[in-house]
Image (cartoon, coloured by chain):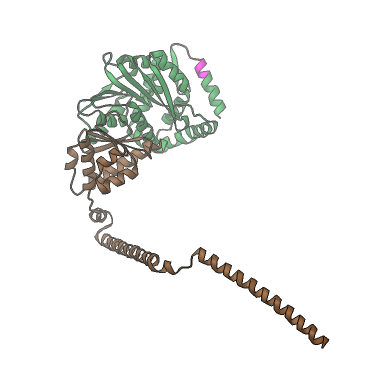
Chain colours: A brown, B green
Amino acid sequence: MPQQALCSVIEIAVNQALALNIHGMKSLTVLDQKTFTIQLSELGFPLSFSVNENKVLVTSLTERSDCTVNTSVQTLLALKKQQQITELIKQEKLDVQGDLKVAQQFANIAESLEIDWQSELAKHIGDIPTYKLSQFGSNLIKKFTFATQQIQADASEWLVHEKRLVVTASQINHFSQQVNTLTSHTNDITERIEKLSSAIAIKTTIT
Amino acid sequence: MADQQDNLQENVSKSHNDSTTHFGYQTVDKNEKESKVASVFHSVAAQYDVMNDLMSFGIHRLWKRFTIDASGVRPGNKVLDLAGGTGDLTAKFSQLVGREGKVILADINSSMLNVGRDKLRDKGLVQNIEYVQANAQYLPFEDNTFDIVTIAFGLRNVTDKDMALRSIFRVLKPGGRLLVLEFSKPEHEVISKAYDFYSFNILPKMGELVAKDGDSYQYLAESIRMHPDQETLKGMMDNAGFEQTSFKNLTGGVVALHKGYKF
């Protein structure tokens, strides 16, 4: 029953988020009694979102869907970034059946969702801790953003300039070969010197 | 201990005649069972939801979700939630059938029905739900009335299960489906032993502690053991006239969802 557990968690999260939406539930009324089904290839089972009296019900039922979308998580992300529905349908990465308007209305609600986290948090832990916590959070985000930018800058610096100075594997091989050749030459010379030395020694003994 | 329970179950089954039935491990007169079951549910009604969550660790919600997903319910459908108790299934069905649809929450026990009605009204679910106090064996509805009939954790408490199944078959529309969610026989020996230990040692104590009623939860454990296993219940549904009957074991067979159609 993992799919029922997932549906349950999503249902609680969606309804909680909608209840906290600062724009209220007005946008949901246009979708009353409508159902949007999404079948993600990664999941293997459908997720149906049915709106009833300002509540969203999440099930695996497909029988009552007004619009069904078959796609993958990757395509969904691409869709969000580029607004290229027609192109994705042509590429067979997105299959829409039913009333596309229903899907668009669901997407609009998801996009317009705005939650005043500070006010919600203050209700539970008080104003001052919320202020401190949000400051700590924003500082953390700033530091994280700075660190990310710094890492990106360092990486590009390294790629553009320093990487050129780094010795490549072929250069090391070439250098090793040169060292080996030099060693062998040195050994040859040493051998010749030893031979010459012994020849001189023999001549000196004879004379 | 499991062997003792098996022997007891066998003896109880053998000692039955037409006028008797089982109430847990006891053999009682058929006329007596109804009132005995009624007293159990009058006693537990107020704490029913809390105990369900405690006893099943909340998993009963997933079993019920599974039932909803298997129901194929559509807007405009007419649904009978039989032995619906505190209305968990009714709440979901009410939202899924929409304004044109209708859900009947039926239970033989007035206390359970009252708790269910109060709970659903508190949730704001009023417009498409009706409440009927009814015995599953003698359903007070016309033939071919419902698209879907569900009975969740109720069939084992019915005195004459075959009669109840025939009654359900009668009120279903052609093409309609019955869903029976009920405790069943665990598939594996290890699960079965752990389940027996939990049912007979922990469950009654939990009932005593929370609902101040250990006896009712002792009955619950015994009635689960006396309930027909998966294949037997499937056969009973076939005999009642249902077609394309099947079952799906949930949580290792601790619970099974039986499905059958009327054509």
Q: Is residue B160 visible?
A: no
Q: Is residue B181 left or right of residue A29?
A: right
Residue A5 horizontal/vertical position (percent) = 37, 38
From what the image shows, is residue B241 above or below residue B7?
Answer: above
Q: Is residue B6 left or right of residue B238?
A: right
Based on the picture, tell me whether residue B12 belongs to the magenta stretch.
Answer: yes
From what the image shows, is residue A159 above or below residue B143?
Answer: below
Q: Is residue B198 visible?
A: yes
From what the image shows, is residue A165 above or below residue B256?
Answer: below
Which of the pair B134/B88 is nearer the observer?
B88
Main secondary structure found in the magenta portion: helix
Q: Using the rendered view, name the quadrant where residue A14 is placed.
A: top left
Task: Give the residues in magenta.
Answer: B11-16
Q: Quadrant of the N terminus of chain B?
A: top right
Residue at 28 percent across and 38 percent down: it is A90
Q: Is residue B257 left or right of residue A142?
A: right
Q: Using the rendered view, name the quadrant where residue B86 is placed.
A: top left
Residue sticking out furthest to the right: A206
Q: Quadrant of the C terminus of chain B?
A: top left
Residue B91 horizontal/vertical position (percent) = 28, 31
Residue at 51 percent across and 63 percent down: it is A170
Q: Using the rendered view, name the quadrant where residue A136 is placed.
A: bottom left
Residue A11 horizontal/vertical position (percent) = 30, 40
Residue A76 horizontal/vertical position (percent) = 30, 44
Q: Is residue B49 left or right of residue B26?
A: left
Which of the pair B25/B157 is nearer the observer?
B157
